[in-house]
Image (cartoon, rainbow, N blue to C red):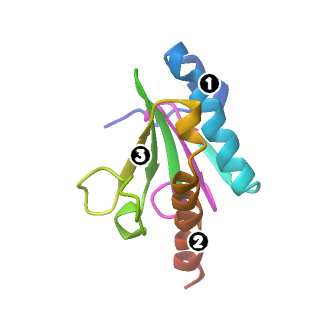
Amino acid sequence: MTEARLGTFDDLLNTTNTSQQPTMKRLREVILELHPSACEVVRLGDRAATYGLGPRKMTEGYAYLQPHDGWVNVGFYQGAALPDPRGLLEGTGAKMRHVKVRSIDEAERPPLRALLKASFTERKKALAR
């Protein structure tokens, strides 16, 4: 089980490989451009920042950023239910999927933005029920 220690995005960035820090920053900017009111919760034990409609990651969260040495995962808590015509999503979990983003250029891809929008919409509808 991971440690449930909270922190800031800068705390997470400080644990990120320097080659991936610009990608992490840009991905965060993209998410906040699409959803300025997103609730950001950084769980240092998970080494991830969650974005959602509220602070509960598995029910209110729709996306997360998780740095790795050569890429940043943009994860989707309900990714298996998302439309993915470009086949960007990876993973075999019952619900979760992710996209590996290796550069700022990849962070700018319209299909990635479409997944973020779809994930936000899915959570909004699910929580409205």
Q: Residues within 10 Å of mark 2 (few under 14, many from 20)?
A: some
Q: Position of residue 48 (x, y in %)?
A: 49, 37
Q: Quadrant of residue 129?
A: bottom right
The mark closer to the camera, 2 or 1, is: 1
Earlier in the chain: of badge 3 and badge 2, it is: 3
Disc 1: which residue: 22
User: Closest to the observer: 128 or 117?
Assistant: 117
- State the residue at coordinates (34%, 65%): 80
Range of the magenta residues? 42-62
Q: Is residue 127 magenta?
A: no
Which circle marks residue 99 in the picture?
A: 3
Between discs 1 and 3, the one toward the N terminus? 1
Report which residue position mark 2 lands on: 121
Looking at the image, is 75 positioned above or below residue 120? above
The numbered disc on residue 74 is none
Q: Secondary structure at mark 1?
A: helix
The residue that appears at 63% across and 62% down in the rendered structure is 53
Q: Position of residue 19 (x, y in %)?
A: 52, 16
Amino acid at dot 1: Pro
- Asked whether the beta carbons under mark 1 and mark 3 sit within 8 Å of each other, the answer is no
